[in-house]
Amino acid sequence: MRLKGNVRSFSFYLFMAVVQISAFFGFFAHLPQGVTAYGIILALPFVFVISAVIMCFAFKLFDNYGSDTSKALKKGLPSSAIVYKYVLSVFLLLAAIITVMRYTDFVSECINKEVSPVILIFLTMCGVLYGSCKGLEAMCGANGIIFTVCVILLTVLFIGLIPQISIDEGTVAGFSETGIFSVLSSLVYLISGLSALPLCIILSEKSKGNNRRSAAGFLLIYYLTAIISVVFVIVCLGVFSLQENNPLYALSKLSGMSVIEENDGLFFIVRTAFVFLELSGYAIGFSSLFERSGSRKSSIVFCLLTFVISEILYEFLKLRADIFAYGIIFGIVLISVVAAVFFKRSVTGGTK
Amino acid sequence: MYMDKSLKKNILDFKEMFSSSADFTIREFKINTPKGKNAAVFTMEGMCNKETLAISVINPIMGCRYRSDNGCELLEVIKTSVITASEMVDVKDTEMFLTLLMSGFAIIAVDGCENMLAIGLQGFSFRSVSEPSGETIQRGSREGFVEPLRINMTLIRRRIKSPKLVFETMTVGTLSKTQICLCYLSDRTSKQILKKLKEELNKCDLETVLAAGYLVPFLEENEEKSLFTGVGISERPDTVCGKITEGRIAIMIDGSPSVLYVPKLFIENFQSFDDYSNRPYYAAFTRILKYISFLAAIYIPGLYVAFATFHPELFPPGILSKIVSSVTQTPLPLMLEVLLIHFIYEIMREAGLRIPKPLGHAVGIVGALVIGESAVSAGIIGSPTLMVVAIAAIASYTIPDLYPCITILRLVYIICGGILGLWGIVLVSFVMLLNLCGKNSFGVPYASPFAPFMPWAMRDTFIRASWKKLAKKVLKIQDVKGADEEQ
């Protein structure tokens, strides 16, 4: 019979790539405080290099973990393994909360001002809960279709925006006036947005079945999809909306296509679809840490916690804690990688 | 339960069993033996051909002289030397007696023998083979399945003249004892799927199976959790033969002209038999048209409500002004207005289906005049709204298999679009897509070959490759990526 959760490598890589791209889109759609669009563009080349090194190193390391190593980890270092598990779960929860908050803010500000943020967060988490209950297999399948549709929509957006591209003195001045702080903070944001990495590590072993996962395959698909998406956005990011708080959304309103003159809905659809996939990925990852894949109890707990905490934070903080939250995430990603190296050496004696 | 040697006792038992039912007939007669032996023929009125029974069975039996007085020896002589019928079955117990009797067999019993002899003399009336009204095509066979199982088996055998084609009969329904027949190609069907299908059918604990739809829930995993069905249904023998050659299993039900087949994929809803008769470019065009129609049927009313209520800037200015003037002149909020027209349309459709055909035209006229003219001119509903619902309704007819799920999804999208705007529509789309991708039909992913993606299978999805290309590799359903794999 079919192995449950036996997801094909290509589908899995594409899912992880979309989770990753979703973070990039999030930044372009809604700039965090202290960051400018110029800063993000300047930071992107560094991000690609740094993330390639981290992901290649960590993914390769974790990919070699078999089920025996996991058992040994639990047996040999039970307390550390539990701590490690909780570190990862806190990361997923935090990443989900920030994503929900930023996304809700984006929807409330740009798309749906009439609906209360509480309802938006609640319904988002209901959708995420449904997705996580369906499991990684269904999620990867849906991801393939959503990604294809999104590429078509982005192409339409891209074609519509081509006539508006204009690089003039203002653009050059914008880049030259961007301070190093803005570039550095963009760098921290974007690297901490590498949420796919821990998720990939958690889900890879659970879902691999008979399929081998390779770091090279994952990186290839990830960079291909990420670069295409980012280029789509950056090429069109003329001078029009770089000073806006929601540059991509504002930009999409400038489309020059007469047929779909106001095509900001297209970008919104892409962003929303990616966010649902990203959040469902976190929920599946969270439930995989505690129970078998597709389990409902831990998915419900995850969605409830995300709903309650993001609702409270959204009401009280109004995203003022952006830099603080991302700093924590960045730290957790680093701790995860360091902890993995440490456990690996402890268990295998550094032979691998 | 075994029968008795005494014919009198057997007759009394069967009369009691049938509570002297009017259609249970017994013809008693004497056989010409040295001592004169009693015999009887049991039939069900209307199920047997009386003329053939008299000429080919009773007449030869009574016209012969027999040397033995032993009941069982007499029955053997009748079987081997007297009756010329082609189909004869030995009846050894009451259950078999009842099944064969109700299937139109005439059963001969001789006093002194506990066994009986069933002779196939089925002569009930049935509808002749004709074109199914629900699945008309431009080119191809005009034959459709009919109610008797044996004729349906013939319709398939005539098209696939291979010894690998297997018909396997089973009985379902504790009361109705309906005969069903599994039909498959032994060298192409997955043994896993066949085994699972038999298990599911054996689990069926229905009292009666009067139509093909009765069995569908037993063949679906988590039926109540999905809008889509993983069980195909057709009344066309050519369509079913096409499915069988792809490794699927057909389930024919005695008394129903609809034949089920499993597993079914989502893309099959967009394929029709005409696609394979038309030129590939035209087939591709109609396929793409059907996909667009499906999306239009479920999305257009919902998007219209969402855009008009929450995102009017998304409409081009020319159209926006017309919509605004229409909405301001009508008394109901837009969402309720669309729902109202949608319900009226569904009522008219249901009425048109159920009432006698001559009155159906009247319903159409009343609908067109009352809804189309009067309601708009009275200012109760707006003409853009009416047009939107009409387009969605017409679009849904291009994919008749998906009509039930389109109707429900359309309502959900209208409500979500009216309450949550475009965001609500994207949310429901995400849930719908997950529902689609999470569904399996006998271990085969329902959304295949889109998810999981199979490039080589795309030759028969949005486009239909030429027969020369299709013939190079036969697609078997178990070859679909993600389908059940032997470990």
Image (tube, rainbow, N blue to C red):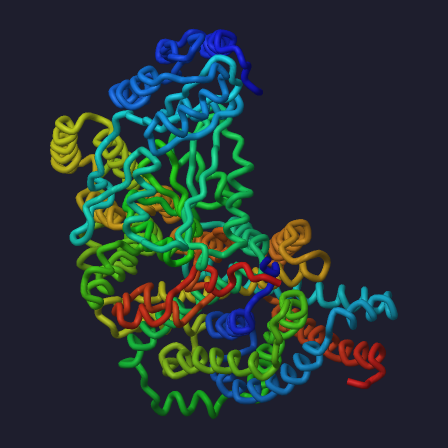
Left or right: residue A27 compared with residue B320: right
Q: Position of residue A35 (x, y in %)?
A: 54, 78
Q: Quadrant of the C terminus of chain A?
A: bottom right
Left or right: residue B84 compared with residue A315: left
Left or right: residue B84 compared with residue B9: left
Q: Quadrant of the N terminus of chain A?
A: bottom right
Is A116 drawn above or below residue A266 in the view shown? above
Q: Position of residue B429 (x, y in %)?
A: 42, 54
Q: Residue at x 69, y 75 (%)?
A: A333
Is B156 drawn above or below residue A46 in the view shown? above
Q: Residue at x 23, y 31 (%)?
A: B127
Is A89 drawn above or below residue B90 in the view shown? below
Q: Nearer the viewer, residue B38 or B397?
A: B38
Q: Nearer the viewer, residue B472 or B272?
A: B472
Left or right: residue A1 compared with residue A223: right
Is B339 drawn above or below residue A97 in the view shown? above
Q: Residue at x 61, y 76 (%)?
A: A213
Asked whether residue B329 appears in the rendered view, the answer is no
- Quadrant of the rendered structure where residue A59 is? bottom right
Asked whether residue B186 appears in the rendered view, the answer is yes
Q: Residue at x 46, y 89 (%)?
A: A175
Q: Position of residue B486 (x, y in %)?
A: 58, 61
Q: Position of residue A185 (x, y in %)?
A: 60, 81
How many labels were placed on the picture? 0
